[in-house]
Amino acid sequence: MKAIVLEKAGGIENLVMKDINKPTINETEVLVAVKAISINPADAKVRSAEEALKLFYGKPTDVILGWDISGTVVSVGTKVSKFKVGDNVFGMVNFPGAGNAYAEFVASSEGHLAKIPSTISFEEAAATTLAALTALQVLQHTVKKDDRVLIHAGSGGVGHFAIQIAKSLGAYVVTTSSAKNKDFVMSLGADEHIDYKKQAFEEVATNIDFVLDGMGGEVLFNSLKVMRNGGSIISLPTPPPVIEEAQNKAENNVKVASMLVQSNGDDMNTLKEMLANNTLKPTIYKTFPFAEMRAAHTEVEAGRTVGKVIVTL
């Protein structure tokens, strides 16, 4: 099969198309013929950092990046009960770990996948994986009806899912984006928009119960200023020492934490149901063919995407 192999940590020039053997599956895995792949900022960060490659793959060279796939099951292990050959499936495979998604065939635990609703394309399904799971896992057990929720970077991959999921939970959603993306985030259900380029969100937002921070740094510390007593903040990209610093500066019983998304078939099935009943709609910013993976990485690294970047096979 064809796969895109990262020969070593660094720039996009290290992503090289190669012919390699198809993966073998164990008794609880399925083999998926991949139709679409979602590219995340995490892909680019892991690609560029040798330490991250060692952490995820146990080695710094010759790895296959990626975790988000959609496709068709072509083989099943002897103990697989959830899927059969011919099923169209999607999921975030083995995160955190070696997902090996940049390939024509991917082996996945059956516990990391869900069936694609009949009304959803392979591209839309692939889009609704790591970013959507992140938003779901952050919000589903944290946000309740009538909470005031602040979602930073609402037009991005995680953000545009988070707005929709928070609204489905009955929250009042405040979100930040540039002015050009105001109509987009409001169309997702946001109740209030803050143009971060012209307004300091900490001077506009008030009495916030929960903040989803995908930015970190100054945004995290300024978020402390908008919180209601007993509120909470989850900052996705922030390392533990900075979380601790923010927690030490927090007042009014505000709790600060970070979170790393985990592969989870039950949560994928929740996303499946939300897609099926139109509670959740992914936005695809750009689509690239498999041979243009480098261009897809460049697009994601630019940090200006509205929704998701997808690669098709």
Image (cartoon, helix red, strand yellow):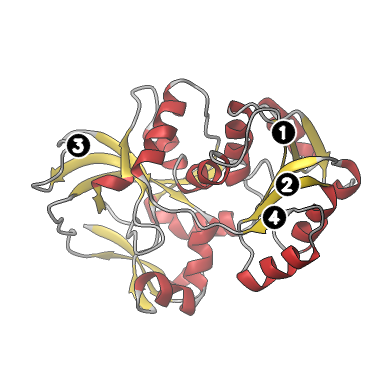
Mark 4: which amino acid?
Lys
Question: 284 left or right of 29?
Answer: right
Q: Earlier in the sequence, mark 1 or mark 2?
A: 1
Q: Is residue 28 visible?
A: yes
Point out the tag, 4 or 1, that comes first from the N-terminus: 1
How dense is the environment of label 2, judged by Cα within 10 Å: few (below 14), some, or many (20 and up)?
A: many
Q: Which mark is residue 83?
A: 3
Amino acid type at circle 2 is: Gly
Q: Looking at the image, do the residues carrying marks 4 and 2 touch, with CB atoms under 8 Å apart?
A: yes
Q: Is residue 273 left or right of residue 200?
A: left
Task: Using the image as rendered, state which of residue 226 and residue 8 is in the foreground.
Answer: 226
Q: Position of residue 69 (x, y in %)?
A: 36, 46
Q: Residues within 10 Å of mark 3 (few under 14, many from 20)?
A: some
Out of 148 and 313, give the one closest to the viewer.
148
User: Does label 4 or label 2 sit earlier along the sequence?
Assistant: 2
Kindly indicate the quadrant of the structure image that contains residue 257: bottom right
* Residue picked out by circle 4: 255
Which secondary structure, mark 1?
strand
Q: Hey, what amino acid is under mark 1?
A: Val
User: Residue, x 46% and y 41% (percent of image)?
Assistant: 127
Query: For numbered disc 4, what is the local secondary structure?
Result: strand
Q: Residues within 10 Å of mark 4 (few under 14, many from 20)?
A: many
Single out the mark in the foreground, 3 or 1: 1
The residue carrying mark 2 is: 231
Q: Is residue 105 above or below residue 265?
A: below
